[in-house]
Amino acid sequence: MQRLLAVFVLIASFVLVSSVSPVWSGDAVAFSGNVKKVILKRNKVGIKNPETKKRVTVVIAESSKLTGFKGIGDIKKGDAVAGHYEVNDKGLYIVTDMEKK
């Protein structure tokens, strides 16, 4: 009986671990929501998804592709946006692409 319980716990642990997918450096992650804050000096934009209430702060880099914006200076509080970011080796969320909805 103990052996069966141990096997069950081992299998359950494996299933649990394999179902969680961590975000690694360089992985593209989708985001969408409304702009809550723009920090021009740091090239950061705070975004909140109205459905999930999840907040994310992304960094606009020189390599970021912006559609509907000329640059970070055109991004305003309340703008609806969607795009992708990658986590760099310092843990920052660097925008790869972002568009105005």
Image (cartoon, grey):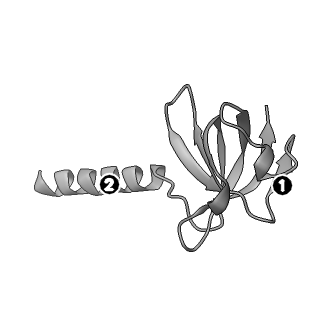
Residue tagged 1: 65
Above or below for 45 versus 81: below
Judged from this view, the residue extending furthest toward the bottom is 89
User: Can you tell which of label 2 and label 1 is closer to the viewer?
Assistant: 1
Q: Is residue 84 left or right of residue 23?
A: right
Mark 2: secondary structure:
helix
- Residue 43 percent across, percent down from the top left: 67, 59
Q: Nearer the viewer, residue 21 or 73?
A: 73
Is residue 8 rendered to the left or right of residue 96? left
Depth check, front residue: 30 or 42: 42
Can you give x and y, in whole percent of width and height, for residue 92 in the image?
57, 64
Q: Which image quarter: residue 42? A: bottom right
Residue at (75% x, 42% y) in the render = 75
Q: Nearer the viewer, residue 51 or 28?
A: 51
Q: Residue furthest top?
A: 51
The residue positioned 84% from the left and 55% from the top of the image is 65
User: What amino acid type should be assigned to the residue bearing mark 2?
Assistant: Ser
Instruction: Report x, y in % for residue 37.
Output: 59, 42
Judge whether residue 38 can be spotted in this image: yes
Position of residue 88 relative to residue 22, above or below, is below
Real-space Cα separation, disc 2 to disc 1, in angstroms: 40 Å
Tell me the residue that label 2 is attached to: 13
Tell me the kind of residue under disc 1. Answer: Lys
Residue 94 vs residue 39, the one in the foreground: 39
Q: Is 65 on the left or on the right of 24, as rendered?
A: right
